[in-house]
Amino acid sequence: MVKRFRTTAALAGVVMILVVACGSSSPTTAPATAAPATAAPAATAAPAATAAPAATPAATATPAATATPAADLPAVPTGYAELDKALGADKPYNGKKVSIQTQWTGQEAEGFAAAIKDFQAATGIVVQHDSIGSSHETVLKTRVEGGQPPDMSQIAQPTAVLAYAKEGKLQDIATLVGADGAAKLKAEFPSTIGLTSQGDKIWSIPTKADVKSMIWYPVKAFAAKGYQVPKTWDELVALSDKIIADGSHPFCVSAGGPGTATGWELTDWVEEVLAKSEDPQVTADWVSHKITFEDPKIKAAFDKVGSLLFKQGAVDGGGPAIVNQDLKTAMDPMFNQDTAAPGCWMQKIPTWYGPGFFPDQRTSGQPSKYIIGDTGDIGIFPFPTISDQFKGVEGSADSFMVFNDRPEVRALAEFLATPEGLEGWIKSTGVLSPNVKVPADWYAGNYKLSVANAILGAGTSVIFDASDLMPPAVGQGSFWTGISDWANANGANTADVLKAIDDSWPK
Amino acid sequence: MAVDRAQGSGSYGSSRLVLVGSLIGLALAAIGVSILIDHHGGQNLLATIYDALGNTAGAEALRNGQGDQFLAKLLLVAIALLVGVGGIWLLFTGVSAVVERFPPRIRDRVLPLVFIAPAVLLLTIYLVYPAVSTVIRSFEDDAGAFTMANWASLATPPFLEIMRNNILWLVIGTSGSVGLGLLTAALFDRIRRESLAKVFVFLPLAISLVGATVIWKFVYAWAPPSQPQYGLLNAIWTGLPFGFQPIPWATQFPINLPSEMVILIWLQTGFAMVVFSAAIKGVSTEIIEAARLDGATERQLFFGVVVPMIRGTIVTVTTTIAIVTLKIFDIVMSISGGRNHDDVVAVRMFAEMFQFFNDGRAAALATILFIAVLPVMIFNLRNFRRQAAM
């Protein structure tokens, strides 16, 4: 009898332990997270002491008196409630953590780290940055669907932001920052905030911008041959013909890569020509499928690109070469200008392009010997104008989504929305901010960014990359596939390709 | 009754020790799991250890997402191994210690269930539940309402093209691997240094699909006709004295389909060959000699005697490779992501899920793949059972 009692008691014990073990995941994690919190004051005191012992206390001690803080921080009052609070002398969010997941690795990750360095020191908020790289979108979706999203995340496609918003996973930033903050966001990001807004709701904060309306060219070879930088489409065609007549190939175009992202460089060409020849509303209607790919205006843009790039000799190897060339190596023939005539002369590629892709740095890992600049080796000129009336600039921008609402997350989101939020990045590894309040002189030391900023200033409107705004099944799917087909056939099948893309549009 | 009691008291002392030990172990495992669940568990734990050791600077660096990240990850791996392997072992010893104390009649009935329960539970959580929810998801739209749209969209030309590609993979990829495997196995059976020859055919199997694709990308690489051809195949092709133009083997339809299948055949032939070779050696020499005495030619001997005798092996190898070809993903994904009319179901499923945000259509594609593999699996299992019965 006693034995049986013991047996049942033991059994009950096992059951209890199991229940506790299964249910304990939250109680036991609580101490785990609590422990760092208690140790955190020391953590944040150390960086503050090492980073800027004089600057940060001064800035936070007398917020009203200092108009421009010495560090990369916005002057208080910033116009955002939670950020003002976070920058207060009492550091209310000291030791609080914000997790953020991005695609940025290498130089971009370094730049982002520089951007948030002073913010962390001044507020005591600890930013845990998960830099994922090329599988970022997959990892993010898995985390979000699994119910454990990061507090914030960067993403390139506005359509992806809207998809998460539709699933109800995002915080409405207009609510987080309040009415005044929302008005400020709309004023400072006039051309980008609307892409991820729906009515009064704002689903993401634009962060890192790229200008796509630029063409890279070999400066010395242009001078040696007496070629002039083309200002208009007609001049571009004339220059192209001249280079072909001289026995070379004017364009380096690659629709291969990086990775499986094939075709976008060619879709960019079509979008650029459309932005430069038609009213911005045409692109907007195209993106929303009010007009189809078979519309005469869209077909005209395809034909215009085709007449330039698929001309005999325009690209070494013709259309199939565009599909086959890897993005990484496409511009290589441009770099032998010191010893011989370049194998190709012009490549349309966005601001994110740079020395990391140049053949010497790519293969050796050492800093490239080629200098980017009007007096250097590789220069950049604005994409030639087509119409006098419409001078749209093609661009794209990453933006930040907010998944969890906590005061410290609000503070970081608000900080990244200020011009100073990217200051550290702009001045270290270089990045273009979509915030119009960023002073032009921050870009002064950087030729590429100065050119990009000048292009933005000269344009009549900024037109966001159309394929990034289309449904992803088209913008990253059938549009890419179709344009590869088009190039493989040297543009002979335009009508078929346009129809196939239209047919694939989600019903 | 007397025997029963004797047994019970005999194992009593050690059983209680085991019981208490495993309970403590389970509690430890629960703590381990809680660390594994925490997103920054490894870093936090290592930081705590650093704090205990007096290395506060290192601890702070870790909590800020810097410092010994690698060490933190190693720690996490160690915990995962301990909890995973040790936890399961403890669970079995602990539970069996409890069950041992039951009356023998109940014990004999309960014990098998106890041992099979964790496996069934895990299978249900990780296989049955996702499979069922995938099928359900394929009939839902974004709002979760019932719809046939996901399935209807699969009848459109782009998806029919995908199905066609998968069927081509199934037919050509499987028959190529099995045919070449059988041929090499039969031929190598008759040469000296057989094992050396087999090693060369078998070696590619050790390479991952992605790795093999990268290797073959260099073979298939294309450069404009004016440039030197660095791709092996195009270098040979244009080097021939016929003035051939370079061909984009991997990126232009339709040549890209056979190009990709060659990669799989290159990998799978070795597997087929090794299994066939073993089976051929298993055919008894008496039968072969008897056939020879009866005047069979070598061809008759092979197709009339050897092949029928290893029929079971051929079926098993064929079904195994057929499943590989149906699920083909890595090769197509690494070549160009299926952008040049070479898309297959698995690649499109991934794209629909993670790039196009069409979860419903991705689920429908997954279900198709599941249904396509199912008959092959059942056939294979039946075959196994028949062989086991023999």
Image (cartoon, rainbow, N blue to C red):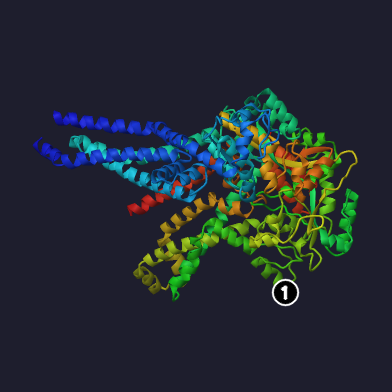
Q: Check the picture and name the quadrant holding the C terminus of chain A.
A: top right
Image-quadrant location for residue B12: top left
Lateral position of residue A24 relative to residue A341, left or right? left
Residue type, mark 1 in image = Pro
Residue B365 visible in the displayed image: no
In percent of the image, x 77 and y 32: which residue is there? A290
Q: Is residue B167 above or below residue A277?
A: below
Q: Check the picture and name the quadrant holding the N terminus of chain A.
A: top left
In percent of the image, x 47 and y 71: which residue is there? B197
Residue A389, position as x, y percentages in the image: 89, 38
Chain for numbered disc 1: B
Q: Is residue A207 above or below residue A175?
A: below
In percent of the image, x 84 and y 52: which residue is there? A308
Residue B103, position as x, y percentages in the image: 18, 35
Lateral position of residue A72 relative to residue B66, left or right? right
Question: How many residues crowd around disc 1 within 10 Å: few (fewer than 14), some, or many (20 or more)?
Answer: few
Residue B336, position as x, y percentages in the image: 64, 53
> Which residue is label 1 attached to?
B241
The answer to which of A268 and A34 lies nearer the viewer is A34
Q: Is residue A143 above or below residue B341?
A: above
Label 1 residue SS: loop
Residue A453 visible in the displayed image: yes
